[in-house]
Image (cartoon, rainbow, N blue to C red):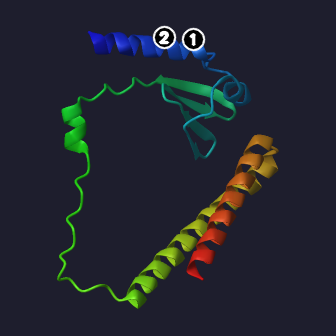
Amino acid sequence: MNKLLSLFLFLLGSHLCAAPAEIGQNEAELLQQQTKPLGRIEAGKRVIYRWADKQVTVSEGKVTAIKLIAPEPEKTLEERAAEAPRPAARPAASRPAADPRTQAAKLNTAINNRIIELRQEQSKTSADLSRAESNGNKAQIAYHRSMIVKQNKEIDRLLSLAN
């Protein structure tokens, strides 16, 4: 009963805090009325925004579907304890220390792999930016440019670690 009441109050509060999304609403109006979405997925002409309490699908700039999401029920202390990660076993004292050159090589390999991933993401983001510029969508242009800046900063940080 307590969980059901909590769910009801949560859904009621979330609908009273922000203006509800409506089918047929413009994407710009939706984003202006709602809080910042937790996630955004773009698939062709469809964009799916996710908030804590709902998922909204936008096709060609208009809201086409709204799906309410019920919060997960709270877990008991026993359930949380069962899911908590177990601490790793301590290494044996008799085990020899790893060679520092081997550790450095592994670190550099991991850094190089991450830089490669970031450059691939940057390539996709640049393509998305080009599409947004051709469509004249200022919000997407600003978003993609900020993503490219973040990716550049991360690459610079990783390069400084490798040196």
- How crowded is the residue under tag 2: few (<14 C-alpha within 10 Å), some, or many (20+)? few
Q: Can residue 137 be seen in this view?
A: no
Work out whether residue 135 or residue 31 is closer to the camera in this orientation and state it.
31
For mark 2, what is the residue?
A: 12
Q: How many marks?
A: 2
For residue 93, which numbered disc appears in the image? none
**Location of residue 88 by image quarter:** bottom left
In the rendering, at what x and y percent does residue 83 appear?
Answer: 24, 43
Q: Is mark 1 on a helix, strand or loop?
A: helix
The residue type indicated by label 2 comes to Leu
Tell me the residue at 71%/26% (across/down): 32
Q: Is residue 59 left or right of residue 81?
A: right
In the rendering, at what x and y percent does residue 59 appear?
Answer: 63, 34
Q: Can residue 104 be seen in this view?
A: yes
Tell me the residue at 20%/83% (across/down): 95
- How crowded is the residue under tag 1: few (<14 C-alpha within 10 Å), some, or many (20+)? few
In the rendering, at what x and y percent does residue 1 appear?
Answer: 26, 9
Q: Are marks 1 and 2 in contact (CB under 8 Å)?
A: yes
Please tell me whether residue 154 is drawn above or below residue 27 in the rendered image: below
Tell me the residue at 48%/25% (across/down): 53
Please tell me whether residue 128 is drawn above or below residue 152 in the rendered image: above
Tell me the residue at 63%/76% (across/down): 160
For residue 16, which numbered disc appears in the image? 1
Please tell me whether residue 131 is drawn above or below residue 162 in the rendered image: above
The CA distance from mark 1 to mark 2 is 6 Å
Work out whether residue 112 or residue 78 is closer to the camera in this orientation and state it.
78
In the rendering, at what x and y percent does residue 117 appear?
Answer: 54, 68
**Location of residue 27 by image quarter:** top right
The residue type indicated by label 1 comes to Leu
For the C terminus, which image quadrant?
bottom right
Work out whether residue 34 or residue 153 is closer to the camera in this orientation and state it.
153
Please tell me whether residue 71 is drawn above or below residue 49 in the rendered image: above
